[in-house]
Image (cartoon, rainbow, N blue to C red):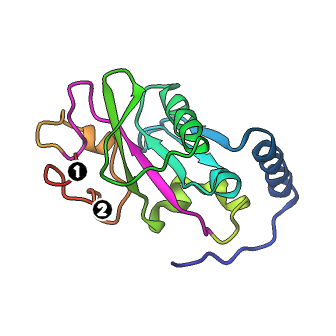
Amino acid sequence: MTSVTAAPLNPDEQRYRDWILREVETTGAVVIDVPPDEEGAGYTFSVGAWRRFGVAEAVVLGLPEGMGNILINLYLDRAKAGERFLPGHIYENFFEGVPITVERVAKGHYMEYFGSAFVLYRKGDFPALQLIVPTPQGHWPWSPDAPPGFQDWQHVLTESGLPESWLPGHNGP
């Protein structure tokens, strides 16, 4: 694992870190929404789940506004209750009739998708999972039947951009 050299925090970063720590102690984790922009889809991620509950931080990309926050909070609730999430497995009962799966996030994506987490985990030493949601018709981003552009909107945060913890259609979705 490559670590990040942590420079001292400036006063604004220290206030932000203090706020995150208070929230983590009070609620268990902070959920941060990043809106879409000209460079890509919006995303939502957690900060503090690893510190407080020993479960991977989570990120979800490309969902309609507000849905990422709901999904991350449901993940946190289930993780706090003891459920563990394994890459390539299907998990039901997040959204009615739509399952999810998870994949490990490659360290090379941490700074872009978990930037705020670095004020808490100064060396980037936390595990992270991507929560992946298919279309309502059941097409995953890597599926040949997925709508055009879906893989760009909800790309997989592995080194290859495809699932790496399982073989799609063989031992995973």
Image: 47 above or below 95 = below
Q: Nearer the viewer, residue 26 or 68?
A: 26
Mark 2 and mark 1 in contact (Cβ < 8 Å)?
yes
Numbered label attached to residue 107: none
Q: Quadrant of residue 111?
A: bottom right
Is residue 140 on the magenta stretch? yes
What percent of the width, then of the height, locates residue 19? 82, 46
Q: Which residue is mark 2?
A: 165
Taking the spot 61% from the left edge, 69% from the top edge, the residue there is: 125
Taking the spot 27% from the left edge, 57% from the top edge, the residue there is: 163
Q: Nearer the viewer, residue 42 or 93?
A: 93
Dot 2 crowding, Cα within 10 Å, few <14, some 14–19, many 20+: some
Q: Which residue is mark 1?
A: 172
Of the numbered discs 1 and 2, the one sitting upstream in the chain is: 2
In this view, the residue farthest toward the top is 96
In this view, the residue farthest toward the front is 82
Amino acid type at mark 1: Gly
Tell me the SS state at disc 2: loop
Tell me the SS state at disc 1: loop
What percent of the width, then of the height, locates residue 143? 16, 43
Q: Nearer the viewer, residue 30 or 54?
A: 54
Taking the spot 33% from the left edge, 52% from the top edge, the residue there is: 156
Dot 1 crowding, Cα within 10 Å, few <14, some 14–19, many 20+: some
Magenta span:
124-142
Spatial distance from mark 1 to mark 2, Cα to Cα? 9 Å
Q: Quadrant of residue 33?
A: top right
For the stretch drawn in magenta, the main secondary structure is loop
What percent of the width, then of the height, locates residue 10? 84, 62
Image: 23 above or below 122 = above
Classify residue 32 as left or right of residue 40: right
Is residue 25 on the magenta stretch? no
Image: 56 above or below 72 = below
